[in-house]
Image (cartoon, rainbow, N blue to C red):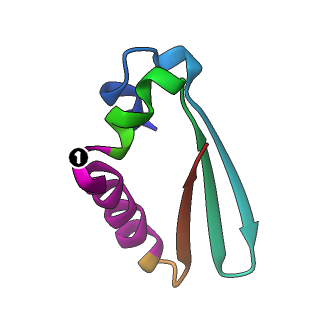
């Protein structure tokens, strides 16, 4: 995901997994521990924005999206 790679200092450590179950998409995002704060953002604003973008894209296909960060 381009957005995540541009936020972190170690883009090689970014791993994204996708699990699709019917109309539900669950993304599992793994980043370096030093980059977790950058992805989450102050008061969760960055991750909330990323989730909004994912939900907007999934709404076109009538799907629900969840993003988990490990």
Instruction: Out of 2 and 70, give the one closest to the viewer.
Output: 70
Q: Is residue 54 above or below residue 40?
A: below
x, y (%) of residue 33?
A: 52, 26
- In percent of the image, x 36 and y 45: which residue is there? 40
Magenta segment: does it hold 47? yes
Picture quarter with the C terminus: top right
Span highlighted in magenta in the image: 41-58
Instruction: Out of 47 and 12, give the one closest to the viewer.
Output: 47
User: Can residue 3 be seen?
Assistant: no
Q: Residue furthest front?
A: 43
x, y (%) of residue 31?
A: 54, 30
Q: Is residue 42 above or below residue 52?
A: above
x, y (%) of residue 45?
A: 24, 55
x, y (%) of residue 30?
A: 60, 36
Numbered disc 1: secondary structure: helix
Q: Tell me the residue that label 1 is attached to.
A: 42
User: Can residue 48 be seen?
Assistant: yes
Q: Is residue 69 above or below residue 67?
A: above
- In percent of the image, x 66 and y 81: which residue is there? 23
Q: Is residue 41 above or below residue 51?
A: above
- In percent of the image, x 35 and y 52: which residue is there? 47
Going by the image, does 62 lie left or right of 35? right
Going by the image, does 67 lie left or right of 59? right
- In percent of the image, x 45 and y 14: which residue is there? 10
Instruction: Out of 28 and 2, give the one closest to the viewer.
Output: 28
Q: Residues within 10 Å of mark 1 (few under 14, many from 20)?
A: few
Task: Tell me the chief SS of the magenta region.
Answer: helix
Magenta segment: does it hold 30? no
Going by the image, does 69 lie left or right of 37? right
Q: How many marks?
A: 1
């Amino acid at each position: 995901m381009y957005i995540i790679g541009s936020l972190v200092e170690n883009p090689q450590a970014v791993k994204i997994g996708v699990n699709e179950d019917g109309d539900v998409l669950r993304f599992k995002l793994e980043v370096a521990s030093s980059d977790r704060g950058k992805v989450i953002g102050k008061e969760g604003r960055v991750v909330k924005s990323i989730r909004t973008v994912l939900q907007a894209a999934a709404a076109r296909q009538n799907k629900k999206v969840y993003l988990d960060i490990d």
